[in-house]
Image (tube, rainbow, N blue to C red):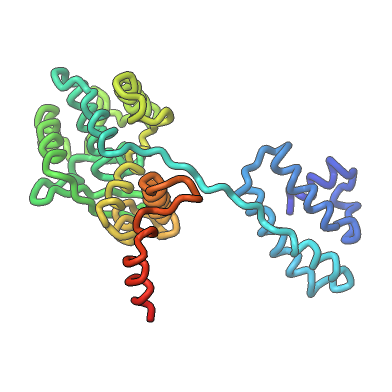
Amino acid sequence: MLLFLIYMKLKHNKPADKLDFKDITQEKIVSFLEWLEQEKTCSISTRNARLAAIHSFFKYLQYKVPEQLAEWQRILQIRNKKVSRPTITYLTADGLKLFFQQPDTDTKKGRRDLVLLSLLFESGARVQELIDMTPSRVTFGNPSLLRITGKGNKSRIVPIADQSATLLRSYMIENNLLESYANEYPLFGSKTRCKFTRMGITSIVKKYANKARKINPSLIPSSLTPHSMRHSKAMILQKAGVNIIGIRDFLGHVSVTTTEIYARINNQQKIAAIEHTALSNNGNEYPSWQKDKGLLTWLESLGK
């Protein structure tokens, strides 16, 4: 409500000590919400969060100031704005293949970049989770496992493919990261053992995305980011038939609601594929099976 008091002073010349309940109307609340979006450049999500707080306050006022009940109820009728569903950028299997072909593995830096990018994809890790990764969190075996510490200091164990594990082991041997004294070194860092930054990893992703895009722009989205690797892994898992709960646990999402976006996208792709393979785009024409009276009679008999 503090922001609302500021708004009332700025836009209606009503300082807090002069403000009366009668000055607060549905129209002023709506105007305040518009002010948040337009002048304070708040997102729709933030605007809705502010409205939720307002609703809570005026639910309370229904009992404390009942003489203004009609106006409080008008304010409670203000609805949230719909938030557009976020679009996600990811690579298809062909896009991933092209992308991973770009690092020059004849150089030490190129080998490091390939391992970093493959691990970012294979683990589905957030950028910060990869930055915080240390050799002590890697276990080679069948399968090889990574212990990832994510939001809220929660840990999860994720398996990585044999090919990626082989690359990672070779990289760690080359950089003496399998030695016991290196257990808590950054898995990916500078010569002085400083962690990579978000900007540094973003720069690596963009570098190879630009190279791949020159070869086949249709396979590499224009806005590829490190988080796109996480999206790409989720889409690969979804298409492979892994259920939403499994993907949620793999990615470390708190709620399955966050993970459902991948199922929605995959369903949209299925619908697009069905439409693309339709026998006819002309509404006045019928597929050949609909012209087959014998087949139609047999199909109709199934429901009797």
294 relative to 160 in the view: left or right? right
Position of residue 88 measured from the top left corner of the image (x, y, whole percent): 43, 41
Residue 42 occupies quadrant: top right
> Which residue is rendered at x = 89% and y = 72% of the image?
67
> Which residue is rendered at x = 22% and y = 23% of the image?
103
Q: Is residue 174 above or below residue 80?
A: above
> Please, which residue is most extreme toward the front here?
293
Residue 97 occupies quadrant: top left
Quadrant position of the N terminus in the picture: bottom right
Position of residue 29 measured from the top left corner of the image (x, y, whole percent): 79, 53
Q: Is residue 68 above or below residue 169?
A: below
Task: Give whichever of 100, 294 is nearer the camera.
Answer: 294
> Which residue is rendered at x = 31% and y = 52% of the image?
238
Quadrant position of the C terminus in the picture: bottom left
Task: Give whichever of 264, 150 is nearer the camera.
Answer: 264
177 relative to 204 in the view: left or right? left
Position of residue 274 measured from the top left corner of the image (x, y, whole percent): 38, 50
> Which residue is rendered at x = 84% and y = 51% of the image?
16
Q: Is residue 265 visible?
A: no
Q: Is residue 89 above or below residue 66?
A: above
